[in-house]
Amino acid sequence: MEKRYVAIWFRYLVTDWMARRRPVLRKTPFVFAAPVHGRMTITAVNRLAEVTGLVPGMPVADAKAIEPGLTVFDDVPGLEEKLLRTLAEWCIRFTPVAAIDAPDGIVLDASGCAHLWGGEQAYLDEILTKLKAAGFDARAAMAGTVGAAWAVSRFGEKNIIADDELMATLLPLPPAALRPDPAVLLKLQKLGFHRIAGFADMPRAVLRRRFGEDLLVRLSQALGQAEEFLRPVYINPPYQERLNCLEPIQTATGIGIAIDRLLETLCKRLEAEGKGLRTAALKCFRVDGKMVEINVAVTRASHHREHLYKLFEQKISAIEPALGIELFVLEAPQVEEVEHEQEKLWASGPGLEDAAVAELLDRLAGKAGEGAVRRFLPGEHYWPERSVTKALSLKDKPASGWRLDRPRPVLLLPHPEEVEVTAPIPDYPPMLFRYRGRLHQIKKADGPERIEREWWIDGGEHRDYYTVEDEQGGRYWLFRSGHYNEDQRRQWFIHGFFA
Amino acid sequence: MNSGKADIIAALQREILSLQGYRAVSDGAAVNVGLEAITRSFPHAVFPTGALHEFLTEAPEHTAATGGFIAGLLATLMQRGGACIWISTSRRFFPPALKMFGVEPDRFIFVDLQREKDVLWAMEESLKCEGLSAVIVDLAGMTFTQSRRVQLVVEQSGVTCFLLRTDPRKLNTIASVAQWKVRPLPSLLEEGMPGVGFPRWNVELLKVRNGQPGAWKVEWSAGQFAMLPEQLVSTAPDQNRKAG
């Protein structure tokens, strides 16, 4: 079949994207700039800025001299690539094969697609209108080769080139239309080749010797004498499974079977792709038009069917089938690469890396709620309540070691409780204290350890901590809030118990 | 003839022990918790892992002392890597303190639940998981049937379970391998030194299945248990705090 390609050129890709997000910018000249060798250099300009003579590569200081009211944004690295990818994925509505043509274009393989839009002109118009409505200033051209479509979209006037007029269209174009290396292009310009026609019919051996193989390949590609391959973008189909039921399902057993079936296919696919799910949602569509949803989450990516089934099984009782469920949809919104279990030659000790432990924690979290299962890492704070932080995943390792230099109690009260004390002034540990009606004679004491409040987090008095031991051997952690003052009441608290 | 009878009786005793959940000790399986005198009270003079131990506590001081003692035991149980789960309804346990007893606090997973019923479920689920070194449960009441169930699970999986019974009013007999009572003792310092000494406990084994109950004084110093001679503790002078 005859091949047809469409090349789309986004002249102001990054600036159009910015103007789309902030429509007020449509009326003002603005540029993107990044530091190059210590000075800010323009990387992208919008149409209004281009009209005033600004070009990429110009220092921002010079540009400001030309256009004093210029707005400058910081360049976002990798943004163009991301935008082109999104646009290419969007273009899949026009053809199944869409490829990114870095740095500022997209190439579509439109063979056999245009007639669906009623001809090639209508097809191109449709693409350009849609892009324009979305705020992108694009130029597009259609030709029998990728090279020709590219050349015409950038340098040509017509936008649809039939195969028989390919040669005639290409020859008057400048050599840059062939996509040569910048060095080769410079050499061509130095030698006075301002049109492709100037060198297209030269002997190939001469061209190769002067400009290298690359220019010849580009020329043949544009003329259709050499094949050019596209690398199409690929959209991952969502991880979703559906199960239609002939008869509405009402029983827990039936729901269980449905979940098992859905998991079987989903897990098979995940396993084949080397992936595992982190969260899964089961949507049950009922006969009466309502939808019931249950969710499960796992601590590490898994495609283990039995384990996932157990997690869902805990929640089957939460599904209210009413008159019956006619459609089950299982979705995995969060999917990650799964680490491959390596078979071990010898059994190592059990631990947090153990898959069985991770699965156990999933079950516990599934039953008791996400916040109920916790693991702690040292927090970078002296303040006791903040000295531990919650670990986010099983893989988190402590950033710093656990401290041993200060005594810390085995039991810590969630809120310090007030105690009555008798203490010598000004800074000595108490001689006795009364806690919950019991009097404790203090025999041994250590301290004080002053812990200041972190004023950038909260305000208040500092604490002077004392480790004390009473006549029974009970060891306590007491503190005085703030400095000693005349009114000793509401100053002493118990905060913990030592082993 | 007599020696033959003794052999048969010994063999039968071993069989009964294995039926009661004591595993035959293989080379690497025996754990040396560093408490020789206490360990001798257990059958075969081996600290029973993969069993249910109960600890009686009344006041928070006792819970703290028991927590310290258990952490000391875990230091040996978790030596070859491993994780622990701590299940409770009202957790006051402060993870950084574990480090003092030679356990990495980040290898502990804390499960905080609302209802005692959930605690029992979580306990059984956790004990089934062979990847864990130990499960510590903070639970006020437990019936004999529930404890028997736990004992059966533990025999299968070999996970050690430490049960903290914090409510003295709900005490009843349960199918545990040992019943402990740990109370804090006044620490001892060098003559004339200020401060508070190493943690000291009076460790009592109230009940041991097929073993000898007893009471010992134990100190945690230099990262390990140290057994104290009886008279040393009893005659220890009550050192008065020097004011100043």
Image: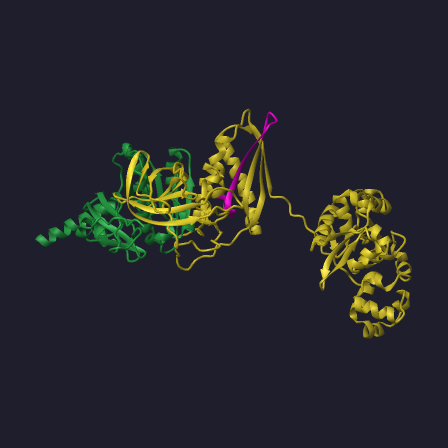
Chain colours: A yellow, B green
Q: Position of residue B28 (x, y in %)?
A: 30, 57
Question: Do we see residue A137 in this rendering?
Answer: yes
Q: Position of residue A462 (x, y in %)?
A: 45, 45
Which one is in front, A195 or A36?
A36
Q: Is residue A289 magenta?
A: yes
Q: How many marks?
A: 0
Magenta: predominant secondary structure element?
strand
Left or right: where does residue A330 sit relative to residue A349?
right
Question: Do we see residue B30 in this rendering?
Answer: no
Q: Position of residue B87 (x, y in %)?
A: 39, 41
Residue appearing at x 48%, y 41% in the figure: A460
**Residue that protrudes farthest toward the front in the picture:** A486
Q: Is residue B112 magenta?
A: no
**Residue that protrudes farthest toward the left in the picture:** B1
Residue appearing at x 45%, y 57% in the figure: A343
Which one is in front, B82 or B114?
B114
Q: Position of residue A152 (x, y in %)?
A: 86, 56
Left or right: where does residue A83 sit relative to residue A215?
left
* Quarter-of-image position of residue A248: top right
Up the image or down, A56 lies above or below B179; here it is below
Residue appearing at x 83%, y 55% in the figure: A149
Left or right: where does residue B197 sit relative to residue A103?
left
Left or right: where does residue A36 sit relative to residue A466?
right
Q: Which residues are magenta?
A: A285-305
